[in-house]
Amino acid sequence: MNGIPMAAGWLLAAGLLTVGLVGALARRNLLFVLLSIEIMFNAAALAFIVAGARWNQPDGQVMFIFILAISAAEVAVGLALMLRFHHCFGTLDTRAAAKLKD
Amino acid sequence: MYAILWLIPALPLSGFLMLALLGRSSERLAAAISLGAVALSAALALAVGGQFLLAPPPGGVYTQTLWCWMRVADFAPAVVLQLDALSLVMILVVTVTAALILVYSIGYMKGDESYKRFFAYMDLFVASMLLLVLARDLLVLYVGWEGVGVCSYLLIGFWYRDAANGRAAQKAFIVTRVGDAAMAVGLLLIFSKLGTLDIPDLLSRAVAQWPSGSAPAVLAAWLLLASAVAKSAQLPLQVWLPDAMAGPTPVSALIHAATMVTAGVYLIARLHVLFALAPEVQAAIAVIGAVTLLLAGVSAATQQDIKRVAAYSTISQVGFMFLALGVGAWSAAICHFVTHAFFKSLLFLCIGVIIQAMDGEHSLFKMHGLRRTLPVTFFACVISALALSGLPPTGGFASKDRILGAVYEAGPGGWLYAAALAGVFLTGLYTFRMLFLAFGDMRESRKDTGGMRRPTASMSAVLVCLAVLSVAAAAPAWPAALGGHAWLPQFLRTVLPDGASTLRAGTERTLSLIALQVALAGAASGWFVAMAGRRMFERLTSSTVGAALHAWWQTGWGFDWFYTRLIVWPTVWMAEINRNDVIDTLTGLCTWTALAGHRLLSRTQTGRLGWYAGCMAAGLVIILALMLWT
Amino acid sequence: MTALFYTAGAVALIGAVLAVAGRHAIHALLCLLVALQGLALAVFALGAPYAAILLVIIYAGAIMMLFLIVVMIIGFNRESEQRERERQPWAVWLAPLFLGMVLLAEWVQVILRTPAARAGQVAIAPDLVGVALFRDYVLGVELASMLLLAGLIGAYHLARRDEGAPPARSAAPPPGGGNA
């Protein structure tokens, strides 16, 4: 196989990260924020896989597996918190919880 | 025996401390502590005085070093007490007068709600005054100087619930503060030029280093004169003394007649060597004394408040002392101080009795029927008036005669002697005017005699004591030309060498006769103004010119009016402009900046999730940029 | 392979954009699912088939299912869609887009500075991954399992509804089946 240019892989990862970041900043609905964070996780995982593939070693995929585990735990806790949030505030709007201010 | 010298100022000070720390106490206990301390001090002073006369210490001076105050490079002032003829005379007068006045106060202040506070302050005052006259170092003297100033303020404003008393106290303090500032500058000057503040040391160094009339001597003399002028209420800083009559009458007797106002006289006498090195300043002292005694005498003759007559009289008599100092008759001035202490405090105490009998009425024109109801007071008042006017056989005659002789000797036929004689006339005038206005009206008073508050036995006893002292004080100072021994001036000459009089006995006798006649003329005029010619006088003062002059003289020649416009209004105006304290806004800038920064940073805490995430992203942007391009 | 990579990458990007900018929750989740599929194919084209399978099975299979389940618990309806539309006027996107663009520019700079190389020339077999995982990184495996345990317990505890604990907002509508 010829492989693909490493830069292309990483550019894809950067693009996905940007998309995820913009979503996390701009959205007010908590669910969409969690969703955007998931995209960012995937982007990071992709970056690792690209690095591993460049050296033809499995370490990149090992890292990917760890990221997967972390992401799974984070999603679980995050969604549980989201349920709690909804129970407390009656809405998923993050502005409703903007109380930590003067 | 001399080793107990330190107890003399320490006892009243401990009396003050005990009274200050005492909680609720009965009047008797407070009076006992206070009077006990001062009386004991007086007894010790008499004992020390007796020893001094019988077995004088070597060199005529006894010094007792208490402790070294501080030691900074070359500056090592020490708290040293010095006993010589001058300070012995001073402590005797101060303690004895204070003890008598305190006995009087026990009866006078009875029933006052702040009884204990009064006696505490009086003790503190006596302690400060004793420290002032016993000090050998100018810095210790300055401590006593400030102490008497503070006590004067506290005691003038004793009845502080009336705001007018507080204002009078403030006025006294501020005006004497001017003098205190001048003294501080003077002390700094003396120390920087001569390197010491120890009085004998500095005087010997001054004589060695400063030729007569040189700039540093003159400057130092002017500054010290300014402080003496402020403390002794002479021109141009005499405005505080008439208002200081707002305090209780014993305070006026002790502080503003007998002792504190003479502190300036003491200072000049103690440092006379320095003033001898600055002849123009000494001449100025004489001029100030002469002008003051005339102005104050005229003002005293136009007053209707009995206490203010006595106040202006004090200013005038201290003017006499300054005049004596100015012509170099140091011991004559101190003699007059001794007699003045007795007869002036006697006068004030009599006034106190009169005021209490009149139920707080101060106006001379409302007093009648007093001669019948207050016989002892009348007798004491007569003695005091005789002494004040300089009529024999009182001490006032002796000391005034001495001053007049010295002034004549310094400038026979000069304007100073004429001014002094005019002063004698004025003194007789206002004194007897006051006496006849107060006691002359034989009509029954509206209050029946039973309702008038009579002086207690102790108060009357004090009046009699002081009357006896006023007459007895004549003996040590009786002029030699009239058959006396003049023992007191000779005793003082060990410290104050002013040379014996060079006048022939005949000239002296003539001068005495002239002075006597002038005084009698003044007394007669006083009687006339008060009694027979009262209607004519009233017509004079109701004419336009007469009324204007009368009002002008009554308010003390307009000095208050002038100072208010010159100093008080501009200062108040500047204070109002600076109400928000311009300088403070600069320091306020720090807090304002901090608060503004805080408010700015607070606004970044919006509580919004998106905002916080955005801030993190922005931080990431900056870090990456730094990594990439530096 | 190269063509596969680029098309799959494009799908992943487009899917992600649609998911982030979506109004309807379920539709957004489905778009994300599609994006994850694209990503899996891209990863496969890079010579990491094991990773690609894991992406499909676990990420798209389990995690996205979790999202969908929670969405169904909370409930999304037409009103919530309308509300989303109101909440996100186009002006809201400006500042994040700007920040994102700046960040992307910086990352591109970083990426372009690295020396060029080719990746994914050899497909790495799963057994190699397994060997590396359990020989070199066994500690990490254990830690990851503990993390998952913690996440499990935490999620269980947090999502539990306390009996009798009132919601913080007094004006809250009845939970479940309400708005989102």
Image: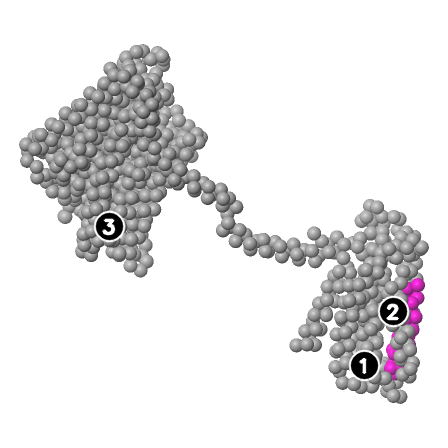
Near-viewer residue (C38 or B66): C38
Specify whether residue B260 is in view.
no
Within 10 Å of the Cα at label 1, are there few (<14), some (14-19), or many (20+) other Cα atoms? many
Q: CA distance from mark 3 to mark 2?
A: 98 Å
Quick check: is B464 in the magenta stretch? no
Work out which quarter of the rendered image holds the C terminus of chain C and state it: bottom right
In the rendered image, residues at marks 3 and 2 fall on the same chain: no
In the rendered image, residues at marks 2 and 1 fall on the same chain: no
Which residue is found at the position 36% from the left and 36% from the top?
A: B562
- The residue type indicated by label 1 comes to Ala
Q: Is residue B567 shown left or right of residue A49?
A: left
Q: Is residue B414 shown left or right of residue B155?
A: left
Task: Name the mark on residue B218.
Answer: 3
Which contiguous range is marked in magenta?
C27-54
- Name of the residue lying farthest toward the bottom: A1
Quick check: is C53 in the magenta stretch? yes
Residue C163 picture location, percent across and down? 85, 49
Near-viewer residue (C32 or B11): C32
- The residue type indicated by label 2 comes to Ala
Which residue is found at the position 26% from the left and 37% from the top?
A: B262
- Which residue position holds label 2? C16
Specify whether residue C115 is in view.
yes
Which residue is found at the position 76% from the left and 54% from the top?
A: A98
Quadrant housing residue B35: top left
Q: Is residue B56 shown left or right of residue A21?
A: left
Work out which quarter of the rendered image holds the N terminus of chain C and state it: bottom right
Q: Write down the chain letter for disc 1.
A: A
- Which residue position holds label 1? A7
Which residue is found at the position 28% from the left and 12% from the top?
A: B442
Within 10 Å of the Cα at label 3, are there few (<14), some (14-19), or many (20+) other Cα atoms? many
